[in-house]
Amino acid sequence: MTRKRLVFSRRNLIPTEKPKHGPQKAALPKMAGVFEVEVDGVEHDHGVGHHHEPNQVDLSKLSPEEKWRVEHARMHAKHKGHEAMHAEMVLILIVTLVVAQLVLVQWKQRHSKSYNLVTLFQMWVVPLYFTTKLHWWRFLTTWFIFSVVTAFVSFRATRKPLNCTTPRLVYKWFLLLYKISYGTGIVGYTVVMFTLFGINLIFRIKPEDAMDFGVSLLFYGLYYGVLGRDFAEMCADFMASTVGYYSASGMPTKHLSDNICAVCGQQILVDVSEEGIIENTYRLSCNHVFHEFCIRGWCIVGKKQTCPYCKEKVDLKRMFSNPWERPHVMYGQLLDWLRYLVAWQPVIIGLVQGINYILGLE
């Protein structure tokens, strides 16, 4: 039985070596390399799976698309005939996801404080590990700036006695961060949708470049939105408890006057019916009044849906009647859902890989 190898040039796919005898049938994909050949009626695989044969294709001379095809072919050759093992790995993945979700839900219900702290640490560290490994310097730069400013604001929020200007500073910073992340996420999503519809071609922008730009903006917006809300919630709890008009459990330690904001503890100078120069005054359904920045930071950024003083349920739709403000509330709910994906999904995937390694599944 005669075996022959056909090597095709990248440009015109003309065989460089012609066989001398026997019927020949060659597959001619659009790439350079060594391909499957049928000689004397029998198919022989002279592709990427035979590493010991000479004259293997030089990957350094191939385009990125051709390299991807070669690696894809190698992956298929490596995993061929392992269907039962793959089914077992998928089953392990599904079971682990379900069990992990149940454990996280029970942990959050029974010990919410420790759950929130661990989740915040995960959100802060896990992306840092992967981006450092991949050398994403732009993300590392923004992460460093965010960490420095947020660390300073959090330090101010946890001091006792609390400075009278600290609550306003904290809520302004996190509300600004929230709006920036919201705008960045919207722009990234718009760019992705425009790329899917081919609008990028009008501006002569390559699809891969436009998609990379859109996905990057979407990632920045969602990540810093989630992380900023978690830090804001922690600071809001600490500051309100320090002021004394709020207690996470039990009764407040101070009596709230009619002209005092329960979030920051400062006097309210603008009446509810008046139009303020810098900010307005909000009155909740429980008749307690607050500064505009304080109650916005408390409800939207700090993720609180109760009155800081009496803990009555806050109707966000009534408080933010302007239709342009309601998307901010929905965006906050989206960030809460994405927290699980960013913080815990990498940990669960790593756990699945560890189980597969222990069981000898590769």
Image (cartoon, rainbow, N blue to C red):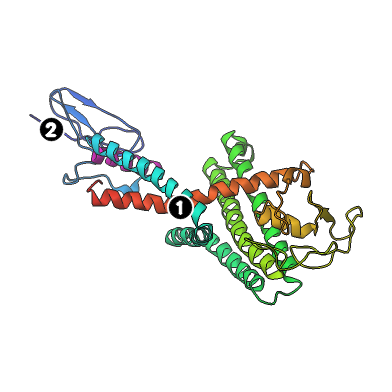
**Nearest to viewer (mark 2 / mark 1):** 1
Location of mark 2 (residue): 3
Q: Which mark is residue 37?
A: none
Q: Residue furthest bottom?
A: 161
Mark 1: secondary structure:
helix
Residue at 58%, 58% (x, y): give it: 227
Query: What residue range appears in magenta?
Result: 63-79
Q: Observer-nearest residue: 115 or 27?
A: 115
Front-lying residue, 330 or 234: 234
Residue at 73% over, 46% down = 316
Which quadrant holds residue 82?
top left
Q: Judge left or right: residue 228 versus residue 287.
A: left
Which residue: 71% across, 68% down? 253
Q: Is residue 158 magenta?
A: no
Per the image, the residue denoted by label 1 is: 344
Q: Measured from the top left, where is residue 358 in percent x and y?
A: 24, 52
Looking at the image, which residue sits at the far right? Answer: 274
Camera sees residue 179: no
Q: Tell me residue 353's x, y (percent).
A: 32, 50
Task: Report whether 291 appears left or right of 2.
Answer: right
Magenta includes 73? Answer: yes
